[in-house]
Amino acid sequence: MHAVGRASDKEPVFVNIAYRGNPDSQDWTAYVGKGVCFDTGGLNIKP
């Protein structure tokens, strides 16, 4: 995380999500997200 975050002008952030719901419930809870987002700022670096 430190190595990837060094390339940005913003500080990297680590998010920890914990949910303790009703253990008797049959309902499901899902968290969906993307871990790393890389933006070249419009610069095309692919050959």
Image (spheres, rainbow, N blue to C red):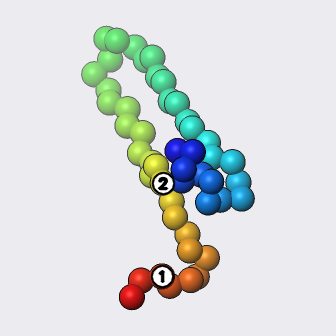
Q: Residue at x 46, y 49 (%)?
A: 35
Image-quadrant location for residue 8: bottom right
Please, what is the three-letter code of the amino acid marked with disc 1? Ile
Q: Secondary structure at mark 2?
A: loop
Residue 5 place in picture, x, y as percent: 60, 52
Residue shown at the point (39%, 88%) measured from the top left: 47
Instruction: Using residue 4 as the reference point, say whether residue 25 is left or right of it.
Output: left
The residue where tag 1 is placed is 45
| Residue 4 as seen in the image, left or right of residue 28 | right
Measuring 45% from the left and 52% from the top, which residue is drawn there? 34
Disc 2, disc 1: CB below 8 Å? no
Q: Nearer the viewer, residue 16 or 2?
A: 2
Give 2 or 27, whichever is nearer the viewer.
2
Cα separation between marks 2 and 1: 18 Å
Which tag, 2 or 1, sits closer to the chain's start? 2
The 10 Å Cα crowd at callout 1, few under 14, some 14 to 19, many 20 or more, is few
Q: Dot 2 corresponds to which residue? A: 36
